[in-house]
Amino acid sequence: MAVPGAVVPMRIEVLHLYRTLLRVGRQFSDYNIGEYSKRRTMDAFRDNKNLTDTRLLSAAFSDGKAQLEVAKKQAIVYSLYAPKVKSILDF
Amino acid sequence: MALRAAVLRHIRLPVQTLPAIGTRPQSQRSFLRLFSSHDDHLTKEEVIDRVLDVIKSFPKVDPSKVTPDVHFQKDLGLDSLDNVEIVMALEEEFKLEIPDKEADKIDSCNLAIVYIYNHPMAG
């Protein structure tokens, strides 16, 4: 039973998604949400590191891509409302 | 008149023969300005030192095992996710944006050093 849109990602695609998510985390103007993004990415990818079931793999990969889209939009929104003074944690 | 002469005798400097300017290479060099914008490139030593520092401060790495030709996954026991994180940390240290295709190839200290040293924007 083929689920439409369920593509099993190649290893390199997973690593590219990881890198892209970490980059978006770096772009956040708010230090706290940026660190959360990066930490959450690292935890999620590590938890799913040993998946072998193709359905779980493709589900996790699609989830990751969806989160990437959310994160990219949020990075823009946060930058619009960024405080004028940088957080002390950024130094 | 004698007072004037006495005072002048103290004020006037004795004549010295200075050595010819051409025989003083140090002062000559100080007049030579290098106006090239490329002479502030990082030295290989500086690149090596900073790359090793970044890798040693990575939490999952044992600093005593880090040498300039160490392989991240084979020698330091890291996995591919850690590899990505290390390359990101190097990007932050040297203020670079490494494209995915190039970043995929960096899996050892040596390759990182060579890539960064040859990158014109490394800072």
Image (cartoon, rainbow, N blue to C red):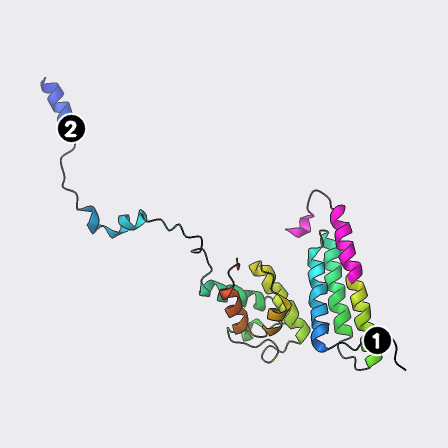
Q: Residues within 10 Å of mark 1 (few under 14, many from 20)?
A: some
In this orientation, which residue lies closer to the viewer: A59 or B17?
Answer: A59
Report if residue A64 is visible in the image. yes
Looking at the picture, does residue A65 appear above or below residue B76?
above
Asked whether, in this view, residue B81 is left or right of residue B34, the answer is right
Quadrant of the rendered image containing residue B70: bottom right
- Residue B84 painted magenta: no
Q: Amino acid at mark 2?
A: His
Chain containing the residue with disc 1: A
Indicate whether residue A85 is drawn in magenta. yes
- On-image quarter of the N terminus of chain B: top left
Q: Taken as a whole, is the magenta stretch helix, strand or loop?
A: helix
Label 1 with label 2: CB-CB less than 8 Å: no
Residue B10 is tagged as 2
Tell me the CA gap for discs 1 and 2: 99 Å
Residue A80 horizontal/vertical position (percent): 75, 46
Q: Residues within 10 Å of mark 2 (few under 14, many from 20)?
A: few
Regarding residue B58, the answer to whether it shows in the image is no
The amino acid pointed to by label 1 is Ala
Q: Residue at x 44, y 56 (%)?
A: B38
Q: Is residue B40 left or right of residue A16?
A: left
Looking at the picture, tell me which residue is in the foreground, B8 or B17. B17
Q: Residue at x 58, y 58 (%)?
A: B95
Q: Residue B16 location in percent, x, y?
A: 14, 39
Task: Report whether A34 appears left or right of B103.
Answer: right
Residue A81's place in the image compared with B80, above or below, is above
Read off the residue under disc 1. Answer: A6
**Residue B90 screen position, x and y as percent:** 59, 64
Q: Chain of mark 2?
A: B
In the image, the segment drawn in magenta is: A69-91
In which quarter of the view is residue B7 placed?
top left
Q: Secondary structure at mark 2?
A: helix
